[in-house]
């Protein structure tokens, strides 16, 4: 199959050898689980349990709020002990509303609907079950999967692309799940394809995963699912890039994959879909790679949602040396965290403890305009120019250069010889522009309120004046009448 | 505000120091060859140039209250001075090197705002300033002698302007131009003066950078292999000189020098691989760099052929430096999801 | 030769200067449609924090050039940039960036329900009737401070808005030697 060349991109050291040969192991049941109400894109979920409630594994504990939201289920059986704030897996370290669950050790599943004929369900039904299972994109974007299915089915998707790229260094969770659960994944892929009536199904896997490719090819043999081997590069697993490489089409700026008749899903999401449709099981766990130079025994674990990260690190035999930095996700786009109390959420693909050598960062020097960043950018932007504009607070100039098209992949920062924090500049600028947009909207709203109030006051004044004038006129009329009557009496 | 570090949490094993260091490494073989050809005077000049640059840069950084050590250690000032030194006549007096280095570093670089902020190539700006201000010293070339001056003699040559006896000579381009004005055609002027093999290996009259074209070419290829520079600007510059030279040489072989003569003389190899590839003053995109190189090459050939100066690289580079912002304004990569003019691509749902 | 150059250039300068003066006098544009356009960019809540009589007064001063574009605290950075763009001046955002967004908040224990605050609120951001504890609608509050001035028990005060997961964004990277 003809592949198109990825523009730009970088080749960071893979470092997957640290963990890739470790098969997936289940983490021992944690005592306490912290399940945030916001683990997905969209509105946060609304709790449907109270403190003290006993729940079973897989039981709904928070309902989706609207279409762009996701429901959340109890990762294990136990008691709800708190409904409050907990540190979020977010760089700000700010708190997020969280349901705290104390496990009772039994890990008892709630009764679920199991079927032998998952393809007997209608496409709409499949999407509904995916929604009920609280499935979101497990590649890291955490977009509600059911919403994507419905949108794609309604807009007529031609090609379903399954993303088995996993281009981030260190991460091997997708590699392992493809090796070990290829049959279930293929079934999940076929279910998704059925749910959106896709005409073509492609599974893109990077060529640094030969065992996974073989496993998936074997599992897909008797189906129409096509396994496509892609060159390994960062960011091959980025949605925009994988679509282009496999189909030659580009998502229009500001558009969505459905604009080019494509739907992209992560392979782990396919597994979750299969579990949800065939066994009725909601999303309560995911595979996480624990790795990094400072971890004693890097491994891939199946962790329950809400498990504090500390337990994963302990399972990997703890630190072999003091970690310079701990990261959730991969090193290229992952977020640093400092509290090991931070919970695993639906989008947590990796827990890394990195040494200073691995991070390789240094003090920033001035930009020498070498344009390595331009050559590395997969989108075709000019990072050095955008950063220069942002540095002097010319944010609109940066937008004119294409800031809004930046996918924040980090390739530019990775190659910059001057160690300039380019993506940091871009995310700062995007955040600042969003804040300005919010304050502008608020201003328009308050202006309307102020005008409405002024009009109301003016109207009240007017009415009062009219009422007074009427009373006055009536009074005068009465007086005239009285005077006339009096005069009439005197003349009579 | 939490000082959490922003991604990426990994970095390519590269730094400004490494980039500059690699370029210096690429220059070393040609420089050492030049030292061997011209002896101690050349070494003195090179050393003086470097020292002056370091002192000048340190002074300017102090004046601006900027950290001195990191800026000096990144190697950019040293590179500028090195490039200037090997483009000077090897027997030039010390004050030429000092003046040139100080001009390059202070006016050509620091006054613009330091590393990365200058519009014009500092080494070329300094060279042009010297050429215009001190034409005699800058065009007094010496031939590589069988017996180089002793070290003591060299000190006198560099620091006391003792003339080198019997070795004064014109560089190839200078000789050709002079002869041409005297009505002597190329065929005659080049005979005995230009032996292609000699030119390749550099054992003829010129600056250190002018000789050893092969070593410079190898250095340049090394830089391309190491991805410090791309091939676009150097190839474009060589084409920009070679193509018109070829055309005009075919039209009138006695009047216009052929491509090989041009390519091997006047520091063109140095210019193509080490000067036009200066990242600070060249365009951002590879297409832009190609246009930049092409312009440099064409202008070099034009100035050499019809201009008043025998050698045109420095002037050509400065002129194209001025055009770099313009090139950058119009030559930008196409953004994913948009067409060339920035309009989002239309939706394309069908097969 | 030099004299000729000096005389001719001086003469040219004088002539052109004179022509410019004439144009400034006789070709002057009366009135300023700019004022209305500027007023559109301002919040329109007539809070008076700028020191001018309402947003119209501020617009007049801006059009004249006697007020800086950073004069409107409730407007925030968005207004500063919009005004700077309209007037074609440089916007010095350093002072605006530092001001923390504020909102009025009622300390319910001390509120006596006197209704003085909601009567003066220019955007109707306070809800409350007589003898009822008042409450502030964050989305409507522009932090003009009028309520704080009239409250007899100091129960309504301007407080900085705390950053939330939704409003947090990355700080600007430290500017290194450029």
Image: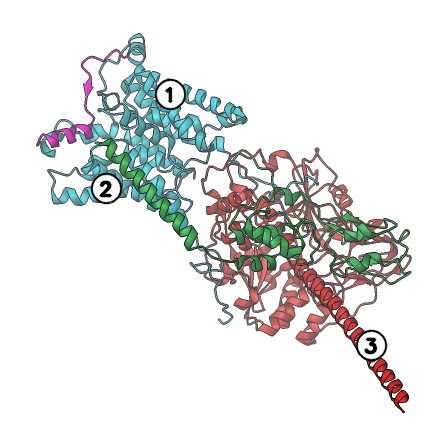
Q: Which residue is mark 3?
A: A471
Vertical position of residue B153 compared to residue C127: above or below: above
Q: Residues within 10 Å of mark 3 (few under 14, many from 20)?
A: few
Q: Look at chain C in the picture and name its colour.
A: green
Q: Which residue is located at x 64 percent, y 66 percent?
A: A148
Q: Which residue is mark 1?
A: B49
Q: Is disc 3 on the same chain as disc 1?
A: no
| Quadrant hosting residue B164 | top left
Which chain is home to disc 3? A
| Image position of B12 (left or right of A341) | left
State the residue lying farthest toward the front: A491
Q: Residues within 10 Å of mark 1 (few under 14, many from 20)?
A: many
Vertical position of residue A479 compared to residue C152: above or below: below
**C80 inside magenta stretch:** no
* Chain coloured cyan in the rendered structure: B
Pick the front one: B346 or C169: C169
Query: Which quadrant, please, contains the C terminus of chain A?
Result: bottom right
Asked if residue A34 shows in the view, the reply is no
In this rendering, which labeled residue sits more in front, label 1 or label 2? 1
Tell me the magenta residue range: B161-183
In this rendering, which labeled residue sits more in front, label 1 or label 3? 3
Instruction: Residue A341 in the image: state x and y as whole percent.
Output: 78, 44
* Chain coloured red in the rendered structure: A
Q: Which residue is mark 2?
A: B242
Name the N-terminal-most of marks 1 and 2: 1
Which chain is home to disc 1? B
């Amino acid at each position: 199959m003809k592949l198109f060349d990825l523009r730009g991109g970088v080749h960071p050291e893979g470092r997957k050898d640290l963990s890739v040969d470790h098969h997936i192991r289940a983490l021992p049941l944690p005592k306490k689980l912290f399940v945030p109400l916001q683990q997905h894109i969209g509105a946060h979920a609304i709790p449907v349990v109270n403190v003290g409630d006993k729940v079973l594994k897989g039981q709904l504990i928070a309902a989706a709020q609207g279409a762009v939201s996701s429901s959340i289920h109890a990762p294990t059986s136990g008691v709800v002990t708190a409904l409050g704030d907990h540190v979020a897996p977010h760089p700000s370290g700010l708190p997020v509303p969280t349901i705290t669950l104390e496990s009772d050790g039994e890990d008892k599943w709630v009764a679920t609907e199991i079927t032998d004929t998952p393809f007997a369900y209608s496409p709409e039904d499949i999407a509904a079950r995916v929604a009920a299972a609280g499935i979101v994109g497990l590649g890291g974007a955490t977009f509600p999967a059911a919403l994507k299915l419905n949108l794609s089915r309604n807009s007529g998707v031609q090609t379903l692309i399954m993303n088995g790229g996993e281009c981030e260094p260190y991460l091997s969770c997708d590699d392992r799940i493809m090796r070990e659960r290829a049959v279930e994944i293929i079934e999940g892929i076929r279910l998704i394809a059925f749910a959106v009536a896709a005409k073509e199904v492609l599974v893109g896997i990077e060529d640094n995963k030969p065992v996974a490719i073989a496993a998936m090819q074997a599992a897909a043999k008797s189906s129409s699912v096509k396994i496509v081997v892609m060159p390994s590069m960062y960011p091959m697993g980025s949605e925009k890039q994988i679509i282009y490489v496999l189909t030659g089409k580009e998502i229009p700026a500001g558009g969505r994959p459905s604009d080019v008749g494509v739907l992209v899903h992560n392979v782990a999401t396919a597994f979750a879909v299969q579990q949800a449709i065939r066994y009725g099981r909601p999303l309560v766990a995911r595979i996480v790679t624990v790795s990094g130079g400072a971890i004693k025994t890097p491994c891939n674990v199946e962790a329950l949602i809400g498990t504090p990260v500390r337990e994963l690190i302990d399972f990997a035999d703890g630190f072999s040396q003091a970690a310079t930095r701990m990261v959730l996700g991969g090193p290229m786009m992952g977020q640093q965290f400092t509290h090991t109390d931070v919970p695993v959420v639906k989008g947590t693909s990796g827990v890394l403890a990195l040494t200073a050598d691995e991070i390789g960062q240094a003090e920033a020097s001035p930009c020498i305009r070498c344009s390595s960043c331009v050559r590395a950018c997969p989108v075709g932007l000019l990072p050095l120019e955008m950063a220069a504009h942002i540095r002097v607070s010319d944010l609109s100039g940066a937008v004119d250069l294409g800031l809004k098209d930046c996918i924040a992949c980090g390739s530019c920062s990775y190659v910059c010889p001057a160690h300039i924090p380019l993506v940091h500049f871009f995310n700062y600028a995007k955040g600042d522009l969003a804040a300005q947009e919010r304050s502008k909207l608020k201003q328009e709203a308050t202006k309307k309120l102020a005008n409405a109030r002024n009009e109301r006051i003016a109207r009240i004044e007017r009415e009062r004046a009219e009422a007074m004038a009427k009373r006055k006129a009536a009074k005068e009329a009465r007086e005239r009448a009285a005077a006339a009557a009096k005069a009439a009496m005197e003349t009579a | 505000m939490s000082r959490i570090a922003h991604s990426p949490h990994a970095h390519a094993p590269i730094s400004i120091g490494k980039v500059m260091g690699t370029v210096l490494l690429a220059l070393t073989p040609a420089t050492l060859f030049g030292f061997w050809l011209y002896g101690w005077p050349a070494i003195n000049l090179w050393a003086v140039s470097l020292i002056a640059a370091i002192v000048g840069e340190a002074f300017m950084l102090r004046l601006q209250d900027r950290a001195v050590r990191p800026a000096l250690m990144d190697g950019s000032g040293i590179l500028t001075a090195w490039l200037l030194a090997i483009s000077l006549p090897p027997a030039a007096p010390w004050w030429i090197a000092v003046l040139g280095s100080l001009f390059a570093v202070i006016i050509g670089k620091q006054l613009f705002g330091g590393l990365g902020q200058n519009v014009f190539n500092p080494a070329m700006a300094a060279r042009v300033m010297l050429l215009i201000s001190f034409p005699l010293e800058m065009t007094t070339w010496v031939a590589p002698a069988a017996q180089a001056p002793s070290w003591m003699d060299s000190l006198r040559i560099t620091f006391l302007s003792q003339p080198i006896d019997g070795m004064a000579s014109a560089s190839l381009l200078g000789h050709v131009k002079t002869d041409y004005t005297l009505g002597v055609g190329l065929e005659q002027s080049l005979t005995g003066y230009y032996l292609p093999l000699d030119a390749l290996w550099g054992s003829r009259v010129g600056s250190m950078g002018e000789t050893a074209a092969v070593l410079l070419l190898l250095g340049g290829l090394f830089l391309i292999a190491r991805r410090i520079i791309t091939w676009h600007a150097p190839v474009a510059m060589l084409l920009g000189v070679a193509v018109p030279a070829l055309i005009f040489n075919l039209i009138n072989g006695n009047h216009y020098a052929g491509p090989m003569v041009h390519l091997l003389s006047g520091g063109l190899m140095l210019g193509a691989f080490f000067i036009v590839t200066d990242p600070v003053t060249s365009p951002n995109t590879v297409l832009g760099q190609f246009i930049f190189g092409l312009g440099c090459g064409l202008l070099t050939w034009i100035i050499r052929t019809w201009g008043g100066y025998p050698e045109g690289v420095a002037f050509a580079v400065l002129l194209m430096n001025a055009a770099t912002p313009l090139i950058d304004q119009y030559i930008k990569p196409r953004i994913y999801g948009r067409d060339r003019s920035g309009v989002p691509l239309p939706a394309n749902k069908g097969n | 030769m030099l004299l000729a150059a000096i005389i001719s250039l001086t003469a040219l300068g004088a002539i052109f200067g004179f022509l410019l003066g004439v144009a400034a006098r006789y070709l002057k544009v009366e009135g300023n449609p700019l004022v209305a356009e500027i007023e559109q960019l301002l919040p329109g809540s007539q809070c008076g924090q700028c020191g001018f009589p309402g947003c119209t007064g501020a617009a007049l001063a801006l059009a004249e050039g006697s007020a800086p574009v950073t004069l409107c605290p409730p407007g925030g950075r968005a207004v500063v940039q919009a005004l700077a763009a309209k007037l074609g001046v440089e916007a010095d955002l350093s002072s605006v960036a530092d001001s923390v967004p504020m909102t009025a908040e009622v300390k319910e224990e001390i509120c006596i329900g006197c209704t003085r605050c909601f009567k003066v609120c220019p955007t109707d951001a306070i809800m409350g009737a007589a003898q009822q504890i008042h409450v502030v609608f964050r989305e409507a509050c522009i932090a003009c401070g009028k309520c704080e001035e009239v409250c007899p028990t100091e129960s309504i005060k301007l407080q900085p808005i705390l950053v939330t997961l939704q409003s947090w964004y990355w700080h600007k990277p430290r500017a290194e030697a450029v």
